Image (cartoon, rainbow, N blue to C red):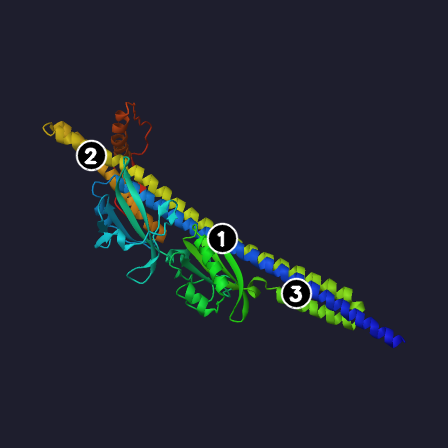
Amino acid sequence: MKVRQTEEFYCLFLSFWSFSFLVVSRKMTKEMAASATRNLNESLDLIKCMIEAILNKEAEYQRLMAQGIAVMEEPEKYVRYFKKSETMVKLALIRTGEKEGVASTGEIFAEEELDFSAGGTIDGLPVSQSYLNDMGTWDYCIKCPVIKGEQEIVTLYVEYIYDTFDKSLPEGFYNQKAMLYIMDAETERFVLKPKGMGERSAGHLNLADFYRANDIQDENLRKEVEDCVKQHKNIMFYHDIRNKNSLNYMWSVNNGTLYLTGYVPIEAIQQEGRTVNQNIIIVVAVMLTAFVLCCDLFYLNQRQQNRIRREREEEREISNRRLAEALQAAQIASNSKTTFLSNMSHDIRTPMNAVIGFTTLLSRDAEKPEKVREYTKKIMAFGQHLLSLINDILDVSKIESGKVVLNVEEFTLNDLVSSVDAIIRPMAEARSQKFFVEVTGIKHECLRRLYTGRKQYYQ
């Protein structure tokens, strides 16, 4: 009788724990799926914000270039003397009403070579579909009108390379177990696979190639993805990639002109999932052996789960912080360059206007030697001031590369004060303002200063 009761007890006990195991496993599976989606959302949003920040800064810088070109008499010269950088590889201008213009590479440029039909924009400026340049690198072009007064006189085209994103994105994406591409939405071509983001064993060319290589053949699913891309929406779906349960994604960037495309294995997002299930099985097995140990094992299991969850949260916080720091660093660097160019543009305009003004006076009073000497002296002062500003601009590249060299030079306060007076006084008189210079209590007339390798003068 007792044996039969014992067997009934164990059967009831086994049934209870089997049911409990199924319930807990199902609950954990749902929690893991929700956590996987939430974590991937956060990571993709940070990458999206970083790329959009780069695109917006490029558009803002191009507007500044257009403002500078608007005051030039011959903007084509600016294009011809342009040298490509790590970001901008080509400049082109087309005057309003004309179909062809000039490019910085020397050939004739026509807008029909590019495709702006998709209607995509970056910060309000039209952006073309992605295309391969002569070196086989994927590029895109932004065009910006050049306004003089209230009339558009020229259209400025700047060609950018996608490799710029690669240098700004953080290294590593789910411990190199995931895959990330940047896709042009209109052509569905993969224009960049960042070097530090995901596996390198596959090199897909477009979305169809990605489907074929990863055996995504469900027509309904592919239709749903196609509709989301057309509507500039995000989509995630589960699909086995290389026999691994993975979370696939299509993430819209810049209002749908670009998409982040790829997948992340679930085990890479939820590293503790396997451990949790194993612990549940261990708990059930131990409970079948000794009911007394159930509470202890359950307590230990909960502690281990909490520890693993905390470790996962710490890893995610570190990853998010690194992404945020990289985005902030990119924004600070871009803002610094924008501010510098804006200030230098204003500072250069002042001595240039003075040189032009005194040159006009010089031609008018050419028969008056004393006026000629006065105007010549002031033109020389303004020209030297303009030269120093240009030298400052050229020194920026040296400062960024760490190659700037400081030298010591002697100068006199009398020459410095005379140079400042020659620059400021005409501007004050033009505004009907009074300008006074008073120098007293000078103990040392000759002083020394540091300069960055180019000879500076004070007249």
**In front of the other: 85 or 75:** 75
Q: Residues within 10 Å of mark 1 (few under 14, many from 20)?
A: some
Residue 444 seen in the figure: yes
* Residue 185 against residue 201 in the figure, above or below: above
Spatial CA distance of label 1 from label 2 is 50 Å
The image quadrant of residue 72 is: top left
Distance (Cα) linking label 2 and label 3? 78 Å
Residue 28 pos. (x, y %): 65, 62
Q: Where's residue 278, x and y in %?
A: 66, 69
Marks 1 and 3: CB-CB under 8 Å?
no
Q: Nearer the viewer, residue 159 or 454?
A: 159
Residue tagged 3: 276
Q: Which residue is mark 1?
A: 46
- Give the structural element (helix, strand or loop) at label 1: helix
Instruction: Give the residue pinned by disc 2.
Output: 356
Q: Is residue 219 left or right of residue 403?
A: right
> What amino acid is labelled 2 in the image?
Ile
Residue at left 42%, top 65%? 208
Q: Amino acid at mark 1?
A: Leu
Q: Say whether disc 1 or disc 3 marks the residue closer to the N-terminus.
A: 1
* Percent coordinates x, y for residue 339 in the rendering: 37, 42
Look at label 3 and name its amino acid. Answer: Val
Element marked by disc 2: helix
Left/right placement of residue 430 relative to residue 22 reads left
